[in-house]
């Protein structure tokens, strides 16, 4: 996130900065970085410092819903606009205990992941695997607000959309767990057609490997976009062949967006590594904030807040369903997520978009050795 | 909380879950036996025992990557390497504070946790490491039950190591010296046993056993530099449950702990994995404060 933010700030400043009508000049952005150390307590401390000592005009970032729910409180109390780019829980802009009118959620949420996944399963997988019966889905999720959100939103969307998908088993795991054998054995017993793993890079890769190599659960595994990092592909290796990842930003995929290609090139030139998913929202958010300040014409926080709330600008790295970045009444965006299938080419995993049809780069295929579930 | 009846699971899967519990138990047996040895002989509480375990996993990983050696063979080299590091640690660290105060030993071992974690993080980064087994896709069937060949190998290696450990402790001069030192250090010294050498060997052997556990862990799941803390706590739980200083207690305790964990995940869900073992410990101590096999010397 920091690297993406630095890149965006450098680009904007190289172009002269942000024009602020009030001063009739362009002002350079000064990026002040705070590390919450993925701790709610440290998050509160660092955000308080950024507001009271560094006197920042706008906050951007926040990773981990649990941490952000804590660290946003000083921003709420001081009426500082905060564009949250790394927490997947919708609570960050829908709290009932605090006024979140200064909070903006530029990030996909668990609803977005799950909706995309169940639509894909219903549209693409079910006709192949279970044309005459309900598709059987198992969910293995981290027992945190994030994982519970993925699980609950899956149920909600299946019901709301009237999809012929049955959840045959659900299992949980704790943060930091590395052993999923018992849960996977139970899932195997339930005979799923697919397993949706709601976790992060390491645990998802662990679970897929253990499922395929140790437990003999030869099914279709679905990872979520939090795993869209080069390390995930590296760690998964050949076990990831023909498995699925829900994504909103595919730096390793074949070209699907000129903006993404350009960003990827600049990022590699600047940092020497392929960009991960986590920075993409932050990169966009910096540009969004710059545009909002220009629209506001001032550094007054209330006016910046209003300008962010009313922003309309063309999509950037994160695609939007109608191509326009804007916030709804919950201060959330309406992103377009997609499904990638990972193909092992002998040395690396390469993702290809297989859903939705308007972005499709190749047809979905079942993994080699796939065993369907069902009754 | 949803309690799912274990009986709702098919019999073959239930058997596999039990076997996996034993596999996990094997790793705990090795870890707890090493800790038990150190505590039994030296009366030292080493909270960094989990970090030696992880170090063993990383050393095996390096050996298998650099030399192409079968990771199951690299276990024995890893035992030697980590054992030597253990000896050095004993000389440089614990030897200096032994006999001063328990608080000094405690603080030392807590500090050692962070030293080892940071060292491993620098050497191998924080990314998870999984040792690729050459048998990773091999499944063995026993009628209605099938399991990975790796599972059988883990059990086999644990049995081999523990048999070797038993022979060392019970049938060799060094083992007799260790047992003597665990019973009465002063008397042992008076009998001509060099207890300082015994301390070194004990710590080295204890950390070598931890290294074995770490290698098997890195083959069956994955490791990071920070993955040793919880297993170390579990190892303490096991030796208390089994009876401080009791080798049989460490074995039985380790296996029981692995089975209980697997059972907890099956019935209560994954988030109860770590908690249930400690709950069992509390209950066991209420019923039998000296542990299942009582407090013993090695």
Image: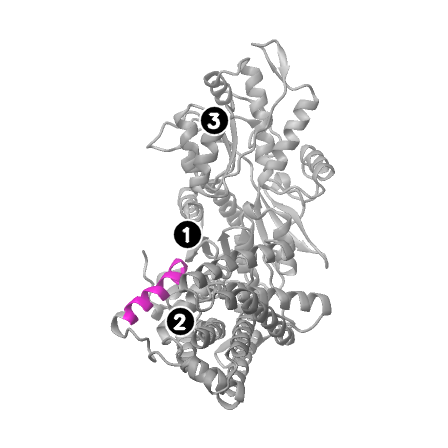
| Residue identifier under label 2 | B238
Q: Chain of mark 1?
A: A
Binning the other alpha carbons within 10 Å of mark 1 as few (below 14), some (14 to 19) or many (20 upward) gives many
Query: Are discs 3 and 1 located on one and the same chain?
Result: yes
- The residue at the point 60 percent across, 46 percent down is A228
Considering the image in quadrants, where does the C terminus of chain A appear?
A: bottom left
**Closer to the camera in the image, A33 or B167:** B167
Q: Are marks 1 and 2 in contact (CB under 8 Å)?
A: no
Residue most extreme to the left: B287
Residue B52: percent from left, percent from top: 54, 66
Residue at x 34%, y 63% (from the top left corner): B4
SS of the residue under disc 1: loop
Q: Which residues are magenta?
A: B270-285
- Decide if residue A202 is in sight here: yes
Relative height, residue B135 to residue A284 (above, below): below
Q: Which mark is residue A143?
A: 1
Residue plotted at (51% across, 49% down)? A122
Q: In x, y percent, where is residue A372?
A: 53, 62
Which mark's residue is nearer the viewer, 3 or 1? Answer: 3
Q: Residue at x 47, y 68 (%)?
A: B98
- Relative placement, left or right, of A196 versus A242 is left
Whole-Å distance between the Cαs marked 1 and 2? 26 Å
Q: Dot 2 lies on which element?
A: helix
Would you name the residue on which mark 3 appears?
Answer: A51
Check disc 3: other Cα within 10 Å, few if <14, some if 14-19, many if 20+. Answer: some
Cα gap from disc 3 to disc 2, whole angstroms: 48 Å
The verdict on a common chain for dots 3 and 2 is no
- Disc nearest the viewer among 1 and 2: 2
């Amino acid at each position: 996130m920091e690297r993406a933010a630095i890149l965006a700030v450098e680009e904007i400043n190289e172009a002269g900065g942000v024009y602020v009508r009030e001063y009739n000049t362009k002002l350079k952005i000064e990026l002040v970085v705070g590390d919450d150390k993925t701790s709610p307590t440290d998050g509160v401390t660092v955000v308080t410092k950024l507001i009271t000592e560094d006197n920042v005009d706008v906050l951007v970032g926040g990773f981990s819903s649990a941490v952000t729910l804590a660290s946003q409180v000083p921003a709420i109390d001081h009426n500082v606009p905060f564009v949250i780019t790394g927490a997947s829980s919708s609570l960050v802009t829908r709290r009932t205990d605090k006024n979140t009118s200064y909070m903006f959620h530029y990030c996909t949420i668990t609803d977005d992941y799950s909706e995309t996944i169940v639509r894909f399963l219903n549209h693409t997988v079910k006709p192949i695997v279970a044309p005459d019966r309900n598709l059987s889905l198992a969910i293995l999720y981290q027992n945190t607000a994030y994982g519970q959100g993925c699980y609950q939103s899956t149920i909600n969307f299946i019901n709301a959309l009237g999809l012929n998908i049955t959840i045959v088993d659900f299992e949980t795991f704790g943060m930091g767990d590395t052993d999923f054998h018992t849960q996977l054995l139970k899932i195997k017993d339930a005979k799923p057609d697919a397993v949706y793993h709601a976790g992060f890079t390491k645990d998802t890769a662990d679970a897929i490997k253990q499922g395929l190599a140790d437990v003999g659960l030869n099914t279709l595994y679905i990872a979520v976009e939090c795993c869209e990092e080069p390390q995930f592909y590296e760690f998964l290796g050949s076990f990831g062949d023909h498995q699925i990842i829900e994504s909103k930003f595919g730096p390793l995929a074949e070209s699907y967006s000129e903006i993404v290609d350009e960003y990827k090139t600049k990022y590699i030139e600047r940092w020497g590594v392929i960009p991960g998913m986590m920075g993409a929202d932050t990169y966009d958010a910096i540009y969004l904030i710059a545009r909002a300040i220009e629209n506001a014409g001032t550094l007054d926080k209330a006016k910046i807040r209003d300008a962010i709330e009313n922003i309309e600008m063309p999509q950037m790295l994160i695609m939007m369903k109608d191509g326009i970045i804007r916030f709804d009444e919950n201060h959330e965006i309406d992103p377009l997520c997609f499904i990638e299938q990972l193909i092992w080419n002998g040395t690396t995993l390469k993702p290809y978009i297989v859903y939705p049809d308007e972005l499709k780069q190749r047809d979905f295929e079942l993994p080699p050795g796939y065993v369907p579930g069902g009754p | 909380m949803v309690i799912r009846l274990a009986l709702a699971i098919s019999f073959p899967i239930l058997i596999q879950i039990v076997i996996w519990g034993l596999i996990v138990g094997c790793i705990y047996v090795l870890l707890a036996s090493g800790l038990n040895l150190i505590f039994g002989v030296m009366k030292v509480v080493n909270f960094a025992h989990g970090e030696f375990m992880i170090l063993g996993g990383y050393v095996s990983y390096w050996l298998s990557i650099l030399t192409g050696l079968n990771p199951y063979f690299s276990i024995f080299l890893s035992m030697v390497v980590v054992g030597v590091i253990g000896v050095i640690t004993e000389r440089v660290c614990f030897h200096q504070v032994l006999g001063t105060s328990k608080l000094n030993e405690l603080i030392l071992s807590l500090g050692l946790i962070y030293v080892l974690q940071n060292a491993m993080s620098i050497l191998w980064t924080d990314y998870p490491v999984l040792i690729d087994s050459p048998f990773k896709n091999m499944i063995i069937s026993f009628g209605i039950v099938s399991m990975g060949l790796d599972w059988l190998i883990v059990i086999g290696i644990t049995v081999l190591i523990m048999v070797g450990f038993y022979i060392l402790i019970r049938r060799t001069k060094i083992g007799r010296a260790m047992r003597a030192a665990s019973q009465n250090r002063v008397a042992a010294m008076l009998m001509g046993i060099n207890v300082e050498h015994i301390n070194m060997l004990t710590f080295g052997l204890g950390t070598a056993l931890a290294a074995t556990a770490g290698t098997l862990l890195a083959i069956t799941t994955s490791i990071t530099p920070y993955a040793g803390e919880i297993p170390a706590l579990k190892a303490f739980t096991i030796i208390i449950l089994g009876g401080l200083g009791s080798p049989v207690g460490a074995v039985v305790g380790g296996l029981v702990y692995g089975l209980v964990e697997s059972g907890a995940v099956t019935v209560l869900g994954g988030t109860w994995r770590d908690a249930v073992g400690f709950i069992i410990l509390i209950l066991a101590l209420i019923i039998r404060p000296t542990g299942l096999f009582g407090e013993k010397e090695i």
